[in-house]
Image: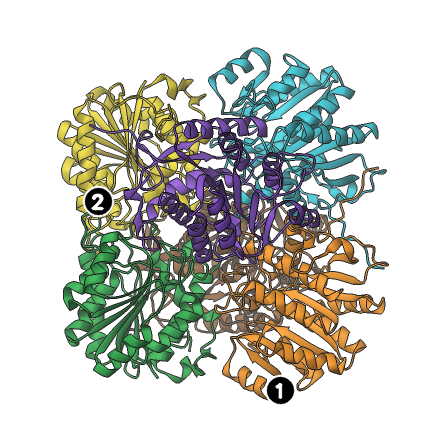
Chain colours: A cyan, B purple, C orange, D green, E yellow, F brown
Amino acid sequence: MIQSNVETFIGCESSFEEASVVLYGAPFDSTTSFRPGARFGPSAMRHESFGLETYSPYQDRDLMDIRVFDSGDLELCFGSSEMALSDIEKRAEEILKAEKIPVLLGGEHLVTLAAVRAVFNKYPDLHIIHFDAHADLRDDYLGARLSHACVLRRCHDLLGDNRIHQFCIRSGERAEFQFAAKHTDFHPFTFDGLKETVRELKEKKVPVYFTIDLDCLDPSAFPGTGTPEAGGVTFLELLEAIQTVSQTNVVGADVNELAPMLDASGVSTAAACKVLRELLLAITK
Amino acid sequence: MIQSNVETFIGCESSFEEASVVLYGAPFDSTTSFRPGARFGPSAMRHESFGLETYSPYQDRDLMDIRVFDSGDLELCFGSSEMALSDIEKRAEEILKAEKIPVLLGGEHLVTLAAVRAVFNKYPDLHIIHFDAHADLRDDYLGARLSHACVLRRCHDLLGDNRIHQFCIRSGERAEFQFAAKHTDFHPFTFDGLKETVRELKEKKVPVYFTIDLDCLDPSAFPGTGTPEAGGVTFLELLEAIQTVSQTNVVGADVNELAPMLDASGVSTAAACKVLRELLLAITK
Amino acid sequence: MIQSNVETFIGCESSFEEASVVLYGAPFDSTTSFRPGARFGPSAMRHESFGLETYSPYQDRDLMDIRVFDSGDLELCFGSSEMALSDIEKRAEEILKAEKIPVLLGGEHLVTLAAVRAVFNKYPDLHIIHFDAHADLRDDYLGARLSHACVLRRCHDLLGDNRIHQFCIRSGERAEFQFAAKHTDFHPFTFDGLKETVRELKEKKVPVYFTIDLDCLDPSAFPGTGTPEAGGVTFLELLEAIQTVSQTNVVGADVNELAPMLDASGVSTAAACKVLRELLLAITK
Amino acid sequence: MIQSNVETFIGCESSFEEASVVLYGAPFDSTTSFRPGARFGPSAMRHESFGLETYSPYQDRDLMDIRVFDSGDLELCFGSSEMALSDIEKRAEEILKAEKIPVLLGGEHLVTLAAVRAVFNKYPDLHIIHFDAHADLRDDYLGARLSHACVLRRCHDLLGDNRIHQFCIRSGERAEFQFAAKHTDFHPFTFDGLKETVRELKEKKVPVYFTIDLDCLDPSAFPGTGTPEAGGVTFLELLEAIQTVSQTNVVGADVNELAPMLDASGVSTAAACKVLRELLLAITK
Amino acid sequence: MIQSNVETFIGCESSFEEASVVLYGAPFDSTTSFRPGARFGPSAMRHESFGLETYSPYQDRDLMDIRVFDSGDLELCFGSSEMALSDIEKRAEEILKAEKIPVLLGGEHLVTLAAVRAVFNKYPDLHIIHFDAHADLRDDYLGARLSHACVLRRCHDLLGDNRIHQFCIRSGERAEFQFAAKHTDFHPFTFDGLKETVRELKEKKVPVYFTIDLDCLDPSAFPGTGTPEAGGVTFLELLEAIQTVSQTNVVGADVNELAPMLDASGVSTAAACKVLRELLLAITK
Amino acid sequence: MIQSNVETFIGCESSFEEASVVLYGAPFDSTTSFRPGARFGPSAMRHESFGLETYSPYQDRDLMDIRVFDSGDLELCFGSSEMALSDIEKRAEEILKAEKIPVLLGGEHLVTLAAVRAVFNKYPDLHIIHFDAHADLRDDYLGARLSHACVLRRCHDLLGDNRIHQFCIRSGERAEFQFAAKHTDFHPFTFDGLKETVRELKEKKVPVYFTIDLDCLDPSAFPGTGTPEAGGVTFLELLEAIQTVSQTNVVGADVNELAPMLDASGVSTAAACKVLRELLLAITK
């Protein structure tokens, strides 16, 4: 019998019921201020993942050994940020209600806010670990408070001080760096301090939302993103950091800001796929 | 004395006071549902225009002979369509108040709505001549009523029946074609009927807003656009049609939907520049 | 309940049982001698089809009105042409056995041979209508008899003289043109003679396999193909020709040789999608 | 015995002695004012020509039937236009001295001046037939009199009035159009008048230098050029015009202004190769 | 009142009078021997700079705190290197006369010669610090002595031995390395020795011209340049080196050899912008 | 006398007789399962090599000092892997018979098998040193045993256990890593252990075939390859490793998997050229 054409991220072919992790894509980039295209990130990752092996020699684990369901991309409205966020939040809620870990594929970084709203609703003691080139702490951007440039600030509105742990930030307005100094656990440029942060979060046994803006990577490793920012971390540093974070109680995660059309070589999409594979293998340990 | 770096579309170096036509750019594409990038259209046109001559052998006229002021691009909010439209409308109003013709460089087609609002406010008997591959007559698109796919429908909300004259449309939902059959002066596929329409509008002496979605051109001539639609008009057909429309009383105009990054050859931007040159020369006759 | 991510060509969401037409993709280009990449054709068409409307104003028909099942892409071996052809043939047989029309998405043109084998097995009085820039009538290419450059010759091995009707051919060795003069119904450069051919085939009531090498289109309309050949037909000419051919008893068809990576503008993929939509609507009339 | 790697344009493998036509490449674009890259034209044509058949169904002739020697590219100085021109002229002289027809592959259009100098030296009654989008009749360009924008003006300095026959010109300063009206046989936009011009030149039995700026083609057919100019001729119109010109006594020719990097699809290079094949077959009839 | 469209590098909006640093662009690449396109470097930097923050977390300084005037690009003749150099030199002289630091945006590296001529005229005890992948010490290149490949040799003609300090050079003819060993302060491959050089120059209190060929960066960080040379320095190493050099008395500087079209991802242009920001902030300390 | 257009890799202009090393290109990629294009690798390297210097400052040696003959590319059948391998093997045999070192330019990695067959035939005690991102140890790939993914497994069929020394492998199925643990001298991720391996091979005085899959490089340094795999070695690490390996008795070598069209910046091709230069200079020491 000829089957329908189900398309998933490689090795993520579990049923929803059996899955412990559920992927969901948010192809949204309406507030991107510089170069759009992150909307194509999740489908590109799914599509190009067949160039990747399911086995990770770094962790000696295989996607075939774990149970991930890929629920595909949401169909989001490009006219209104709030409508899009609301749809993303609903999907995250459904996944959480079924006691599975939601892993969001962006899209621009604003989509993280929707996931955090849902996760925070379930886990009021939530902390966020944030890898990014940009602080994303503006209060508004050209008048918009729902903007990729404000997403961690909106998260701070929810969680309050010292619950957001930011790493490898190397770009922002002076005001954002000043805000960070007062209100977040801020680690510019590198992953220095990550192990300490993780140790404390493990001790506190708090739930963690883990958001990876792929532009934390140096543009040499990841050119396909809207706002490339020279001077980032290497791929191997990111891999190690992901394994470190995965020692905490990760209850939700996302990988965002791949804009595949900006890197015709396909290297960025391939890197994003590998990050996702390692993330999935690490958080299911 | 060393001067500041003023950048204008080629040959559009009049002062605002002396100008009869004023260019203004709306680098906005937040509601683009398929492939974004039209936000870069106006700056690309300005920038690449220095590859164009100011003289048109088609009309035997030269941009140096007319007076156009280029006011540059507006800085628009990517978070909210209504805020962006409001800023565009204000600029159009300023230009109209100074008794000059506003010529808008998009951006996605939604920006036309802002210009039409301003022009309609001044000229309540306004008609619209619309060149496009797409009908743009949806009532909403995934819930958004302010969408590039709805822009002519929103114009129809303002102007009512038989005041919108659509040409070379070759794409849309069945419902849009049915709406057009009842409510607009609809000419699918080609410019057939344009001369008759123009004759009538001249006789009625009504003011005309002229909106050119560059994707009316065949993708072979204009690949650099978000939603290329095979089977369009040729560049020379468009040139002739522009001269025909310019016999009416054009009180506002726009050229939109160039997404320059989608055509790395630069051919689309060059074609857009040439369309703008011919449009400026034609409407100032 | 969260669903799996089924991906189909737009509007082809029928079940297999209810469908009258079944799409199947053959992502194969191993024998491509110049520029490969046609392997990515079928997935690109499926993926980019969401930029297309389901409604055709040319035929006033809508994909939502007909019943097409998209069975996705076969997983083919890149090491052996014969193994790949065998897998494609099996899929075509399954579809034919279920009394549905198989419509193949290539891949390089060699894949047509597999479909023709299956269709010819069911319909021994089969004729082929062939649109192409290239004659594809070599007996071998650098020693390989299973090559994109030989595919119609291999079909001739099966069907014999005067059963292959070739249109708009504009490239080949002298020997191929000489072969064509003797053995096929040959119409170089244009669709001249197509109406007469179709009239005869209708009178004879013979089954027809319809193979469209998209490089019959002029490269201006369709640059994204391995061996672009200037001087081809226009998109509108092709559309009309498809409607003409569809008056015959089309029992199998294919659309091939889109190499999407060769046209970063996306115009070629969009054109291929539109050709497929029009083909599906025409052959189900 | 293992041979050296001789690389020629396809089918141009005659020895120098036996050849009646000699190709020579001038990879020069130093005076290009807008987008450079024509320097890569000749090597790209040579390299990509293996995607072309040697047989022309348009003329029913084959490159294997004629004798063309490909002398490769000159190594030219990018620092000085005059030094480069001098080297090109020397090569043309050598070819002419051996009583062969020199066919130059540009490079920017300025290289034509070197060839014309050599040919004019041998044939003082020389006429030029010029296909181009641009008049190239400026007296200087930003102070430079040796510029691609001045090349026909420099030829006019040599040949004088009414010996230059220009076709399909659609761009230039007003002053160039005025100069043309007085001093050249000028046919804007199309090939209208070509047959009459050719008839006269045949009657006069004068030698003809034939220069084809490939940007005479519409950018849809030939996007890969420094200054694409919408509204050009089609590929088939150019093919017919080449055959028409070849009825005169063509004693030298060139094909120039392919900038292959500007058209990643390869369509422009393929078209240039086909133009060259047809030109070689036509002038050796 | 609607303003003219002044375009500057981000945050460089001082008036000429108030400025301590003046940017000037030299869009010239006529002598580039391999892949041209550096002519588009300065306008790309200006244009893409709006994707950059004005604040540097590396130096905790902001472009809004300093006073830079951007005088735009010169209009240079592509026909003659000497004419172009002369125009650049004049602009540098004007800036120097006004007691401001000229910072040149290339263009190919030859443009540095013009700036050095002007600066050397004012400061006869000038030293040059040179970051580059290539030695640029040829005496001529294919006969041209004014060539990008000769620029430091021409500077040596002016300044003489031991006044040119070269770092991270990793490419050249053997003869250039031999020349360097005798005549310049030469540091191949890395920035090793930079601190010592800077200490000496500080002690001597000599004026320094600082020329950065961006291809000193590894091509992974900076692919968009005419002659990428693997094995270069990292972005962070360059940043640190710039801060080191800025401890000397920098009286003129340039950033050159960005060829933006060669890196469609935009990463190279973004990196160049960031280098310029850091340079401006460092030399104004 | 005008010469034919001989095209070689830069500085490889020796005659066959005098040469100690012979280059031969295998433009084959038929079994590439993900993104094809490695067929264009050897011609791109030859063509772009003129952007490289012949002199290596790393080794203080110059290609002009050694004797390399470039025999160009083989014309290979794309229909059959075995036919292609057979033709490559024949060429390798001819070179070996003349007592020269064959250096193969791929193409996909499968071509290595042909060279190894020929070299192993001459040197039955052959060892292989293998640099790659991928283990290439599958027994078959989708049924094909002659596949790029199986090439080292096929070599193992010939040479047996502990004769294949693999470095920097970071991708494969779990089964391949398990096979390697038992049957090859396996060094994942880095060049750790290379010096020890080389010391042993020197002591044993065994002949060594050295195969470099360029995707061992990190994609940041080498994006232009079919299956980029993040986390690779740097260019300088590879350079050092090449010099280390060259201390053994290298009797054959290859450089493969450059797919130049996948990296439009040209950086990958330039890096491949530099690797080849360093390899040639190192193995002829």
- Name the one closer to the observer, F46 or B203: B203
Percent x, y of residue A195: 63, 22
Identify the residue shown where x is 85% and y is 66%: C98
For label 1, count other residues whose C-alpha is less than 10 Å away and answer few (under 14), some (14-19) or many (20+): some
Q: Which quadrant: the N terminus of chain C? A: top right
Q: Is residue E234 visible?
A: no
Q: Is residue D100 visible?
A: yes
Name the image quarter holding residue A27.
top right
Name the kind of residue labelled 2 in the image: Phe
Q: Give the answer, above or below, for where B60 lies relative to A27.
A: below
Name the kind of residue labelled 1 in the image: His
Percent x, y of residue F127: 56, 59
Separation of residues labelled 2 and 1 (CA atoms): 72 Å
Using the image, tell me which numbered label, if any, was put on residue C183: 1
Identify the residue shown where x is 74% and y is 18%: A206
Identify the residue shown where x is 71% and y is 46%: A10
Percent x, y of residue C236: 58, 63
Q: Is residue E266 left or right of residue A183?
A: left
Looking at the rendered image, the disc whose residue lies closer to the viewer, 2 or 1, is 1
Q: Is residue E52 left or right of residue C165?
A: left
Q: Residue furthest bottom?
A: C182
Percent x, y of residue F244: 46, 49
Q: Give the answer, above or below, for where E215 lies relative to C115.
A: above
Secondary structure under tag 1 reads helix
Using the image, tell me which numbered label, if any, was put on residue C65: none
Q: Residue furthest front?
A: B203
Label 2 close to label 1 by CB (< 8 Å): no
Secondary structure under tag 2 reads helix
Q: Give the answer, above or below, for where D94 lies relative to F251.
A: below
Q: Is residue B46 left or right of residue D137?
A: right
From the image, tell me which residue sits under label 2.
Answer: E179
